Every structure is written in C-alpha cells, then in structure tokens.
Amino acid sequence: MRIAVVNNFYPPRVGGSSHLADSLAVGYAARGHRVLVVTAAYRDAPTFEERDGIQIVRLPAFQIPETRFALSFDISFATRLSLPRRLARLLDKFDPDVIHQHGQFFDLTWASGLYARRRKIPTLLSVHTRLENPAALYSGLLGLLDRFMVFPFLRAYRPAMVVMDRMMDGYIRRRYAGAYSSLVPIPVGISPAAAQSGDAARGRAEAWIEPGGPVIVSLGHVIPLRDRVALVEALPAVLRAVPNAKVVVVGNVYYDAFRKRAAELGVAHAIRAIGAVPKAEVPDYLAMAGVECHEQGYGMGTATLEAMAAGVPVVAMATPDNFPTVPLHDGEDVYLCPPGDIGALAERLIEVLRDPAAARAVGQRGQRLVEQHFTLDVVTEEYLAVLRQLVGPREPNGV
C-alpha cells in the first residue's frame, strides 16, 4: 500500500502523538509499504527529509501562542491560501491508497480529509487529545470549537476513528456522533526495549536527586488535562509517611497550577520539574523511579505504558477497563484509585514507597502485560489490518 501519514505534530517536536505517528510510519515502511509523512514545519527541522524508509515533507507553518484555550500546547498550523493546492499536488504525486491522520483539530487533518473526499480515498483518524479543559470558560469555548469547526470538517468526509482508551471512546461518541464511519479499538503502542534502556544514576544526576531516596516520577507534558494538581495535593500525606520522597516531573510545563498549589501546601521543596527532555533520555528517569504517577484523572495513555514497560509500578487514577481490549487488574499489574480521590491516591503512593519489593512484583507483571499487548509491533499490525480493510478489494498502489 501507499500510506500517507498526516500529523501537525511530528519529530523533532516531542510528544505522544508525534512519536506514535513516527513509529507507525517507520513500522509501515519496514513492512514494505510506501510511506509519505505530511506535517507542519517545526523550528529548524528540514523541509524535506528521507529516513527509515519514509519521506517527510514539512509544510510552511506558523505557531500559535501557548494558551489554556490551545490546551497549553505550542501548536503549529499550516493554513494559508496555497495549502489546498500544495497539499493536492503533493498527495496526487504520491497517489495514496489510504490516509492515516493524527489529531482531529489540526488544519492538515481537515485539508487532507477534504482532499480524500474529492479523490474518494479512505481515511483513518487517530484521536489523541480531547478538546476539554478543567476551567469552565475554556471548556465551553473548546466545546464550541468542537461543535462548529471540528465536527463539520469531520462530517464532510467521515473517517474511521481509532479509539485508544475508554475515555476517548466516550468523548468521540459524545462529540462526533455522525461524523465518523466506524470506531476501531486500537491501544497506544510503545517500544518496551527503549523504555528499559535507562541509567538510574544518570537520571538522578540530571534531576539533582541524591542516591537512594524514593522517587515518584511523573512523566509527560504538564497541560490542563494532566495538571499534576492532584499529585501535589496528595504529597503532604505522602511526605508525612515517607519524608525523603521526591517528585520528578519529566515534561514541558505548559500549565503551572501545580507549582502554585505546591507553594500553598509547603511541598515545593520535594518537587523537581526538569522540563522536556529528548525521547532517548526518558528511560534514565524511569530507571530511577520507585513509582510513576501523573494522575491525569482522565485515564491512562502512552506515559503510563512506557513506565510499565520499564518495570516501574504505576499508580493511576483510572478504571480497570481503561483500554477497551485489555483489562487491567488493580494490585496485580497496576495500582488503581478512583479519579479525583486525593486520599486514595496518597494511600496507594505510600503503599508502593513503603513496600518496594511488592511494588517491584507489580511492576514486573505490568511489564509482561505491555509486552503482550502494547508493543509497537503488535499495534502496527493492528493498524495495518484496519488500513487494508479500508482500502478493500481495490488494487493497491504498492505492497
């Protein structure tokens, strides 16, 4: 097949959507398919690039400010009068059998979707982020954006949509009913070997953490939907039980409410926010972790699976059916507590830090779960099966 992968977010920009899109594109190419990636320009990344069997084209773009309305992301948009013509020329030359889109609120998604409708090309859309915000005003504005901008574009070409977890399933059915042709459950995929390659001593040195002390690693960018406020509010109880515990936040801080709350509660001394780090350095921080927790309160995703793959016990505000096709087991392969329950969150963190041997056993079982169900190899094959089904009996333009 000839597969066009479209995502405004793409490496060198860091983030779960960016890295998954790249990993899948490389995986498609490794299996003999022709792959073209269309993305937005980002910093000094080259306009044209060929690597790992894929072609990457970065279209001119502008970056909007990091605001809470923009989900506190640095988002690049490629919108300009020439975009439809330029995109059509690019895709016509490639002649895709199918288009795999990432992100429902990006201009490249909309433009490629309208192109696909005109050319009668099937599309698959992976929805990575919900347009939601804990602040009522911003949540209302994002709801209007979903209703009056995102929904009409999606309804115009009705892609098949990937459901990665239970929360996303509910969100898609609630916001986009009538704007998709089908829903396909495929979990996030990761590379376990990469997650297991860390050096704990190097991680502690980079985070200025003394040897031997218990560390709660909190992995992923800090945005309103993953604000770390609940983790900070659980921290006073945790520090009373484990006084030398430290929290290390690994990810760009787009939204700093947790810092203000930490100052109010007098626990700021126990928190290290080190910012975004290259993907290759994340395993170093996981290697030093006694537990991982980013308590987003909205389920579990890539960061959780990366921690589990590294054998790190995870404390999460989530339910056992978080992943539609793979059930979780509290106290067996992960530690679960009800979303929003600060007391339960503190209790589970204390339990893990006080009994590291039992926690390691949970981490090892979590690692096996990831290796069975969430590897990039497994997930890539699931995606390819769906893409082949979308292409159907028509003669593909490649393997």
Image (cartoon, helix red, strand yellow):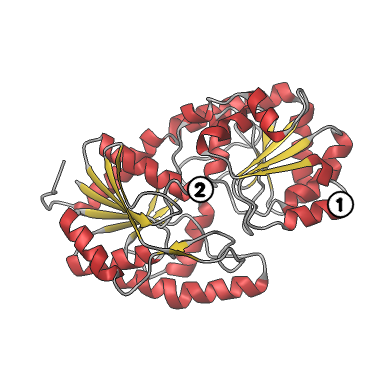
Q: In x, y percent, where is residue 11?
A: 43, 46
Q: Residue at x 43, y 51 (%)?
A: 44
**Residue assigned mark 2:** 15
Look at the numbered disc 1 and give the secondary structure of its residue: helix
Q: Is residue 273 visible?
A: yes
Pick the front one: 293 or 330: 293
| Mark whose residue sits in front, 2 or 1 | 2
Q: In x, y percent, where is residue 302?
A: 52, 43
Q: Is residue 187 visible?
A: no
| Label 1 Cα neighbours within 10 Å, binned few <14 / some 14-19 / many ≥20 | few
What quarter of the picture does the C terminus occupy? top left
Q: Residue at x 57, y 46 (%)?
A: 300
Left or right: 117 in relation to 198:
left
Q: Which mark is residue 265?
A: 1
Look at the numbered disc 2 and give the secondary structure of its residue: loop
Q: Indicate whether 177 appears above or below 33.
A: below
Query: Which of the two discs, 2 and 1, labels the residue nearer the N terminus?
Result: 2
Q: Residue furthest front?
A: 44
Q: Residue at x 58, y 69 (%)?
A: 69
Left or right: 80 in relation to 118:
right
Kindly indicate whether the residue at mark 1 contacts the one at mark 2 (C-beta within 8 angstroms).
Answer: no
Query: Which kind of residue does numbered mark 2 sit on?
Result: Gly
Distance from the alpha carbon under mark 2 to that under mark 1: 30 Å
Pick the front one: 355 or 244: 244
